[in-house]
Structure formats: structure tokens, C-alpha cells
């Protein structure tokens, strides 16, 4: 009896041993939001509520503690209400416009996975692209992952898989879509004296607008005397890589997937895309951004929402 009691006490002691607390967590919030937190402090938030037109990430907190992105155009918020910080969309999907705010919308369908970790956290979702008649035109599996880097810098990684279920899906030729970022007002070239650079040596809108590149960086003031920025990176396995970047001095940039021509997604042949945003201190050296792009380019596709 005594031996049995000792074994029970020992087992209880072992069971009570605390597990390590993940440093990076995806914490569900009210009103269809998920907070990405580092040591309990939020540095990004994913929004997927039915009151929006599409899922998006806002804020995107830089090393200084300020968001490097904003919602809407600073001088034209009404007609640019679709500029949702960091978002994924396309202007023409089987003729339906999912870019501007309107009757077509990208709707959250279900959660697939949510994971925490010591240096990264991720969420995986299924979305439906639904036209004005309420008919799904395309289905999407998405992974949104945050990954810590040194000195308060980090990566926002977005992987998507688009599927045609009953009939082919045409993504028509356009400069608008698939991945886009609306920068904070003070980072814009016009409003804050920021700067745009791309992997090919282009500078500002004149040198980067609709020019193919591996990455495009937007950096500028976020506090007095402090600059930070975001480099948007196109993965080499993506369709039409390197894609042109639609980037403006007024503070936004986008990777234009079908600028060079339309693409049809066949039933049973999904389209997979990978993007990374490098959130960094200062006006990062081009060589530093290129090193981050090369590390991203070396990564391979991981299944979304499927059991490992």
C-alpha cells in the first residue's frame, strides 16, 4: 500500500512539471481577430471578421513599437478603403472584382491549425472568394506565420493555395493583386521623405514602378530621428517570378502577379504562392535585404491544413 501511494505521489509530481511557455503565440481575440505576441506583447494582429471585405493584418509593429502600416490612403481614404495594411486580393477573378471594396468578398470559412513556438507562430485558415451573387469563385488555403529575427526585427510569411473546385478560375491581367502593403503615412516618399528601393537598384516610384524585381523595400521615418521599413519579397517558385511591383511614392506597394498576363487555375491543379515581409530597423542595406530574400528563397512549400 505504501509503495503504491509513493508511486502515485511520484506520478503526480511528474505530471505537474510545467511545460516551457512558447515565446511567440497566436492568441485568439474577440471580434474575429488573432493577436501575434512576443513575450506577451502584441506585434501583429490578423483580422478575419464578416464585417470586413477580406482578411488582413494590422498593425504590423516595427522594432520601435510603432505600426509600419496603416488602414487606407492618407489623402483619399474613401476610394482607397480597400488598402487594409497588409492584404491579399485580386482585381479580376472570373470577372469579379475582389480588389476594391464592393459586393465581392473573401470570406473566412474555418480554422485549420494554430501553432505557437519559441521563434515563430502561425495560423492556417480556409477562405472562399465569393462574388456579388454569393457564388464561390475560388477557394483558398492560407498560412500566416510570424518569425522572429535578431534585434527586434521579424518576418511575416504568407503562403496561399488557390483551388478551382467545379470549373477553371481565370485571374485576368491586372496590376492589382496579389499581395499588397499600405505603409504608415510618415514612411511615404511624399508625406515623410521615405524611400523605395528594389532588388534591381531602382529608387522611388520613378525607378521601381511596375519594374520586375525579387523584392521591393519601403523605408522611412516612424519616430523623430528613427527610420524603419518593410521589404516585400516574391518567392522564386511563384508564378511569373520576378513579378513587377506596383509601387507609389504615396506610400503603398504591391506584387503584381498577373501584370504580364492572365493565368487560369485548372480544376485539380492549385496555384501556390509564397510571400515574405521583412520588418526591419533603419533603411536596411540592399545586401541585408538580399540576404533575407535568399534565405526565404531557399525555403520550400509546406502543406497547409493537411495532417503531417
Image (tube, rainbow, N blue to C red):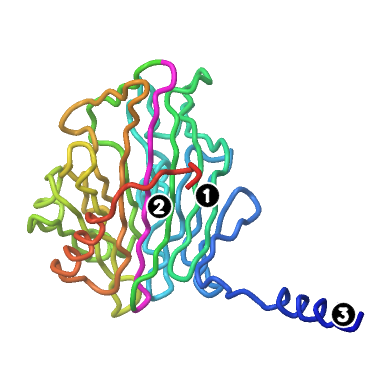
Q: In this view, does 248 lie above or below 97?
A: below
Mark 3 is surrounded, within 10 Å at the Cα level, by few (under 14), some (14 to 19) or many (20 or more) other residues, namely few
- Discs 1/2, front: 1
> In the image, is 103 to the left or to the right of 85?
right
- Discs 3/1, front: 3
Q: Quadrant of the N terminus?
A: bottom right
Residue 21, given in percent of the width and then of the height, sits at 58, 73
Residue 269, given in percent of the width and then of the height, sits at 33, 26
> In the image, is 21 to the left or to the right of 92?
right
Q: Which of marks 1 and 2 is nearer the N terminus?
A: 1
Which residue, as the protein is rendered here, is positioned at the far right?
Answer: 1
In the image, 16 versus 155, the foreground residue is 16
Q: Earlier in the sequence, mark 3 or mark 2?
A: 3
Q: Name the residue tied to disc 1.
A: 47
Cα gap from disc 3 to disc 2, whole angstroms: 59 Å
SS label for mark 3: helix
Mark 1 is surrounded, within 10 Å at the Cα level, by few (under 14), some (14 to 19) or many (20 or more) other residues, namely many
**Residue at the image position 58 percent from the left and 75 percent from the top:** 20
Do labels 3 and 2 touch, CB within 8 Å? Answer: no
- Discs 3/2, front: 3
**Residue at the image position 37 percent from the left and 24 percent from the top:** 268
Is the magenta region chiefly helix, strand or loop? strand
Q: Name the residue tied to disc 2.
A: 85
**Quadrant housing residue 277:** bottom left
Cα gap from disc 3 to disc 1, whole angstroms: 51 Å
SS label for mark 1: strand
> In the image, is 215 to the left or to the right of 154?
left
SS label for mark 2: loop
Residues shaded magenta: 151-166
Mark 2 is surrounded, within 10 Å at the Cα level, by few (under 14), some (14 to 19) or many (20 or more) other residues, namely many
Q: Name the residue tied to disc 3.
A: 5
Q: Which of marks 3 and 1 is nearer the N terminus?
A: 3
Amino acid at each position: 500500500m505504501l509503495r503504491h501511494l509513493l508511486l502515485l505521489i511520484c506520478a503526480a509530481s511528474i505530471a505537474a512539471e510545467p511545460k516551457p511557455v512558447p515565446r511567440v503565440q497566436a492568441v485568439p481575440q474577440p471580434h474575429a481577430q488573432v493577436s501575434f505576441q512576443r513575450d506577451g506583447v502584441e506585434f501583429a494582429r490578423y483580422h478575419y471578421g464578416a464585417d470586413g471585405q477580406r482578411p488582413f493584418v494590422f498593425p504590423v509593429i516595427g522594432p520601435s513599437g510603432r505600426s509600419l502600416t496603416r488602414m487606407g490612403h492618407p489623402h483619399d481614404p474613401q476610394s482607397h478603403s480597400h488598402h487594409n495594411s497588409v492584404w491579399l486580393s485580386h482585381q479580376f477573378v472570373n470577372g469579379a472584382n475582389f480588389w476594391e471594396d464592393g459586393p465581392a468578398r473573401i470570406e473566412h470559412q474555418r480554422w485549420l491549425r494554430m501553432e505557437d513556438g519559441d521563434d515563430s507562430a502561425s495560423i492556417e485558415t480556409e477562405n472562399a472568394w465569393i462574388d456579388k451573387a454569393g457564388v464561390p469563385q475560388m477557394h483558398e488555403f492560407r498560412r500566416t506565420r510570424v518569425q522572429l529575427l535578431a534585434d527586434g526585427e521579424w518576418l511575416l510569411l504568407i503562403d496561399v493555395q488557390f483551388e478551382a473546385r467545379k470549373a477553371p478560375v481565370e485571374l485576368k491581367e491586372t496590376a492589382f493583386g496579389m499581395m499588397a502593403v499600405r505603409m504608415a503615412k510618415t514612411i511615404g516618399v511624399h508625406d515623410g521623405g521615405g524611400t523605395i528601393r528594389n532588388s534591381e537598384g531602382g529608387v522611388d516610384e520613378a525607378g521601381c514602378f511596375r519594374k520586375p524585381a525579387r523584392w521591393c523595400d519601403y523605408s522611412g521615418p516612424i519616430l523623430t530621428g528613427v527610420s524603419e521599413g518593410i521589404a516585400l519579397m516574391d518567392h522564386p517558385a511563384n508564378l511569373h517570378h520576378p513579378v513587377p511591383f506596383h509601387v507609389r511614392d504615396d506610400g503603398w506597394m504591391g506584387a503584381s502577379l498577373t501584370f504580364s498576363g492572365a493565368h487560369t487555375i485548372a480544376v485539380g491543379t492549385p496555384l501556390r504562392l509564397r510571400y515574405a515581409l521583412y520588418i526591419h530597423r533603419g533603411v536596411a542595406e540592399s545586401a541585408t535585404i538580399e540576404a533575407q530574400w535568399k534565405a526565404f528563397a531557399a525555403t520550400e512549400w509546406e502543406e497547409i491544413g493537411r495532417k503531417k
